[in-house]
Image (cartoon, helix red, strand yellow):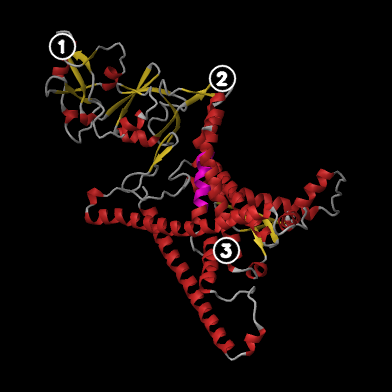
Amino acid sequence: MSLLVVLVLLWAIIHIANYLIHRQKAEALLPISRGSHSLARRRDNLWDSRTTQIILKNLHLRVQTSAWNAKHDVLTKTVSARAGSRLRTALTYFYNAGCLMGVLGTMLALGLLTWNCLQGIVPLLHTTLAPSASMPLLRRDLEVGDKTVVASGGVGIKPIIPGWTVPLNHLPVIFLAVFVSQIVHELGHAVSAALDAVPILSAGASFTVVIPAAFVSFSSSALEALRPFARSRIIAAGPFHNLVFWGLLTLVEFSGTGEVLTRTLYRDVSDIGRVIIGMDGDSALRGHLPVGSLITKLDDTPLASKDDMWTTYLTSPDNPSSGMGWCVSRATYTASPQGCCEPHVSSPFSCFAAVSSAEKGCLDAIAILTNEPAQRCSSDTNCDDASQCVRPHKSAQILRLTVYDRVVIWSGPPIEVYEQVEIGRFLPRFRLVPLWVYLLVRLFWSYLKMATLSLYLFNLLPLPHLDGSQFVGALLDIVLQTDTGFDGYDLEALEEASSSHTGTQRRRRTQWKEMLDKGIQIATTSVFVLSAALTMVNIR
């Protein structure tokens, strides 16, 4: 619902701004004089109504311009200046490799789509055949630092839905990451088209409902006149750019370059504990663990380690309460009620168990566990004669989080803390350096990697209006050798009687190509719709 409100406000602002702009233009009786400064001329060239159009219809905003067509023509002349030039040769090899990666990406994308569909069916079968064994996808995947772990038993591919599967405040960052990835994508189409002297008609950006997009438009007749391999190379260049971009981002991350830059402004505190860098908006810990808090221990387990003790401890099947106990008054513990230890009994107290016996009792967990001067014990011998060693019972599900010199008590499964809280290793070195800058850059980086890899795979699916459908069509042209506008004809052969037979074979191959192309798109669309529906059903 919150995402819907944001979208309604956003589109209301867009329509109001569009109305005010058109009203201002209508009221202007005389054209605005342009300055002679070169910068002003360049700015007018981009925003001049003769080259740039802004189209707004319902929930679709489109901005397209031909201002960059001349620059693409210059690029075309540069790479076509000499047929054997090094630049042209390098680009040709590069985008030929992109065509191969397009084939592999299409197969991988179809495989992932089928796998995700099957993964979506499993929880439904569990719900039908064994309701107690069903494990739907969690609303938020389990995230720790820069690592993401897919929830076990759920759908393999998690949709990014702000306000549902990810926090709503991630929406602007997601928009920016997707838009940057699409610019990289469209540059691939544009540069590859320059190799075959295919001019662009326009370039621009669009925003439909909630999806930002960049685009480059080509002449369909110019594309159809190319050989199938050249056409497939141009189509595959966009996804290939996304794959290469993802590889560069991964290389920078793997080389530690980003961490070196981070350490100039931020210090690694993993030798002390872990830093809270994010939390679910509806978490009960939100008011007690603000962003930037440094957690040093979980129960009695220190987090001062390079190893990921946070994940190990919170996801361990063993109850975290097993460990050191507290010395409490024997008389108070003996006289305490035991009702809170019974299942489904609501009580302000928590169930404790004696370390040296099976005796249980109900005590105030906050008064005991947050009392730092309290004497700790491993058995009754560590306490005086009037005291007894106790610790929280397994059923109490109590977790202590030590933040500097204070203790925060969590009552519930430890895995919920793991799901709701995101941690990191860095704190600002200087007071003037805010932590949110590091968090914002880190968040943008993670979404940028995810967006560019997703565009590589998603665009290669043979779905209508995607690169994949055109790419598969070009591959079928290559395999079936169907008729294209570039084909040459032997005039003498055309005069022979056999030419009619050749034409019939070509028409049959064209028909087979059209049938296969349409069949593949229908099958992929069906699996995609089913997979999306199953994913949404299994999200909670």
Q: Is residue 336 above or below residue 201?
A: above
Residue 72: where, in percent of width, then height?
A: 72, 55
| Circle 2: element type | loop
| Circle 3: element type | helix
The magenta span reads 444-455
Instruction: Identify which amino acid the numbered label 2 is placed on.
Output: Arg
Q: Residues within 10 Å of mark 2 (few under 14, many from 20)?
A: few
Which residue is disc 1 drawn over?
Answer: 381
Q: Which residue is drawn at the image coordinates 45% and 22% (left, top)? A: 269
Q: Is residue 360 above or below residue 48?
A: above
Q: Which residue is drawn at the image coordinates 27% and 27% (left, top)? A: 398
Q: Is residue 369 magenta?
A: no
Which residue is disc 3 drawn over?
Answer: 232
Q: Is residue 72 visible?
A: yes
Residue 481: where, in percent of width, then height?
A: 54, 74
Which one is nearer the viewer's eye here, 277 or 90? 90
Residue 229: where, in percent of width, then height?
A: 58, 65
